Image (cartoon, grey):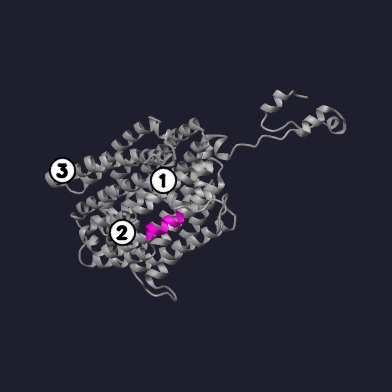
Amino acid sequence: MPDDKDKSSAPYPEPLRDEEITGFSTGMEHALSKTPEPLPPEFARGSIIRVILRMGLPSVIGFLAMNIYDMADIFWVARLGPQFVAAITIFEGFYWVLIFTNEIAGLGSVAVISRRYGEGNLASAEAAIKDTFILKGICALVSGVAGWLLLRPLMQLMGAQGEVIELGVQFGRWHMLGMIVYFSSYTVFTSLRCIEAPRLAMTVMLIGSGLNLALDPFLIFGWGPFPELGIAGAAIASLISYGATLVIGLYVFFSGRAPVKLHWRSVVPVSLRNQLEMMRIGLPGGINMVSFSLSRAVVLPLVAAFGTEVVAAYGMGLRVTQIGILVVWGLGMGVSPLVGNLLGAGLMDRAWQTARKSLGLAVAVMSVLALATIALADPIVRFFFQDPRVVEAGVELLRIYSLALPGIGLWIIMESSFHGAGDNVPPMVLSIVTSWAIEIPLILFFTRALGYDQTAIWWVRVFYATSGAVAAVALLRTRRWMHKRV
């Protein structure tokens, strides 16, 4: 029989031998009185790579499914004409500016929910989730009203003309009406990841994306008993599918099928103070998003100056390269709450190793996807368009812009690690400096001062992403983000 020192160091208590069970010895009494130490939570043990993949892969699959819907959306809308694709592309150029409040509340909620869950404080984690739903509802109302009022002038400001403006307004107004549904659905996904339930989040996302895929052609073209709604049908399909995911997500939480169950009346009540704290934590991330979105809004008219065909190719190219970006973004969505869980549990070194190994995974994934996109650029573009001018512009864009993907992957993981720690100022500063001091001045210099065509814009994007990635890795290596208190 091992002595007590050996038993205490084993992961599980030693099994009792037959003679110990039947005998009447003090050794038996001592053994029966021993209770095994509880195992640490899953995020705190085992292979770090395995835990990263367990948290990240479901998010990757979920976001890929959403991107497949986006690709199908463009596929069907492109059948209506390039002006329809241009309208959606221009709308999305400023849409992310309108929903910056969702980013602020979302980043704050990731830091708070994951920390409370990592500490083992389930009552406070529940309150944080409910606080997030309330906060997102308020933010959605503000963004929706502002978007409805500013939609037409913003389309004009972004360089849209004539029919493209009207199509963008038709598409965008449905998004403004559904803002509360969109924001609340994002809360379902984020909260499930923060409480170690990434597979549940993935399942809900897959259901929504599948419904979206099924509804799109019926509502756009009026198949069967459905009315022909054109570009508005694409927006209505999205609204219906996000509404379904929200209902399913609320059912998962209130039925107790998630690690944290929501109650109508909780031990820890919702708190305006906690909601304001989330906004404070997430504010730098919101500023980052506004800055990035405004920089995209400045770049888009510079692209639009080269014609509707180039804008259509640009919109298609963004969606194709977004496949790789969403893979790493999904991985980062798993890394953020994992880092928060580990810091909440006080496991500093494991949090650092998680961030470091995630960088390697991101570079590997993005490099493979970049090579595949470069090799298959021509058939990819021809899948969407037949116009030779659009095909030529799209192939060139994909082959150049794919070179930026490994750097973008590094950048995403750096931001994800900082978001999980609740330290959102450094990513904000990096994004603002690289966008406004490097990318936009260089694009203006090459296209306006030197008279180069859109090809110069694609090469500037590669330089911008690569230089930002180098700075992102340097910031991560300081490890100061690990000591941020939330």
Label 1 belongs to which residue? Answer: 329
Question: Which mark is on residue 385?
Answer: 2
Q: Label 2 vs label 1: CA separation?
A: 27 Å
Q: Is residue 481 visible?
A: yes
263, 370: nearer the viewer: 263
Q: CA distance from mark 3 to mark 1?
A: 31 Å
The structure residue drawn at horizontal position 42% and vertical position 73%, both measured from the top left corner, is: 223
Quadrant of the rendered image containing residue 25: top right
**1 in the magenta segment:** no
Horizontal relation, residue 264 to residue 225: left or right: right
Whether residue 197 is visible = no
Instruction: Determine the residue positioned at 35% across, 51% down.
Output: 320
Q: Quadrant of residue 233?
A: bottom left
Number of the front mark, 2 or 1:
1
Q: Nearer the viewer, residue 400 or 340?
A: 340
Q: Mark 2 or 1 closer to N-term?
A: 1
The location of residue 21, given as percent across then percent down, is: 84, 33
> Which span of residues is magenta-colored?
132-140
x then y, percent, for residue 248 = 52, 60
- What label does residue 445 carry, if any? 3
Q: Main secondary structure of the magenta part?
A: helix
Q: Residue type at mark 1: give it.
A: Trp
Q: CA distance from mark 3 to mark 2?
A: 31 Å
Q: Secondary structure at mark 1?
A: helix
Q: Secondary structure at mark 3?
A: helix
Question: Label 3 is placed on what type of residue?
Answer: Phe
